[in-house]
Amino acid sequence: MLRKEIIIKTEKQFISLMTEINNLIQNEKGEGMVNVFVAHTTCAIKIMEGEILLLSDVQDYLARTWPQKGDYRHDIIGIRDVPITERINGYSHMRQLFFSSDVNIPCKDGKMQLGQWQDVFLIEFDPMRERRVIITYYS
């Protein structure tokens, strides 16, 4: 087993993790599986195409479906047992519910067995912040 933990400052909504994953598995021989996990509840890990207009379509869909200025009970800080400085981010939690915190990808001889256009993304639903991503390879 190989394990790598990285901290990513999310300066945009879609961040490719391909370089970090490839760096961990590149010298592995035979078959295995890599798991990519994000340890937060307002972002996600997703395999999808990285085409710029598709990413824009996804952003538009998320904004229409769960708008930032929505009516979320999570944002009523006064009745929750949290500090008054807690983030107002009910929309981020709602968006993450329909994505996953991790993906598993089969690997062979140091390469992920992804399709031609597939990329592994960290998707940020909150404003910019630091995120902890754990990449684990099992042979």
Image (tube, rainbow, N blue to C red):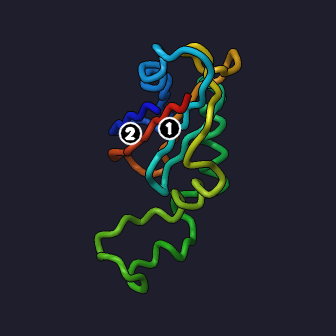
Residue 28 horizontal/vertical position (percent): 50, 17
Task: Name the side, left or right, on which 139 lies relative to 132.
Answer: right
- 49 up-or-down from 57: above or below: above
Residue 107 horizontal/vertical position (percent): 61, 22
Dot 1 falls on a residue whose secondary structure is strand
Between 29 and 41, the one nearer to me in the picture: 29
Q: Residue at x 38, y 34 (%)?
A: 4
Mark 2 is surrounded, within 10 Å at the Cα level, by few (under 14), some (14 to 19) or many (20 or more) other residues, namely: some
Amino acid type of disc 2?
Thr
Q: Residue at x 50, y 23 (%)?
A: 18
- 91 up-or-down from 133: above or below: below
Does the image show residue 108?
A: yes
Q: Residue at x 54, y 76 (%)?
A: 73
The mark tally for this picture is 2
Q: Which residue is mark 2?
A: 10
Residue 105 horizontal/vertical position (percent): 62, 30
Between 100 and 72, the one nearer to me in the picture: 100
Residue 49 horizontal/vertical position (percent): 65, 26
Q: Which residue is mark 1?
A: 122
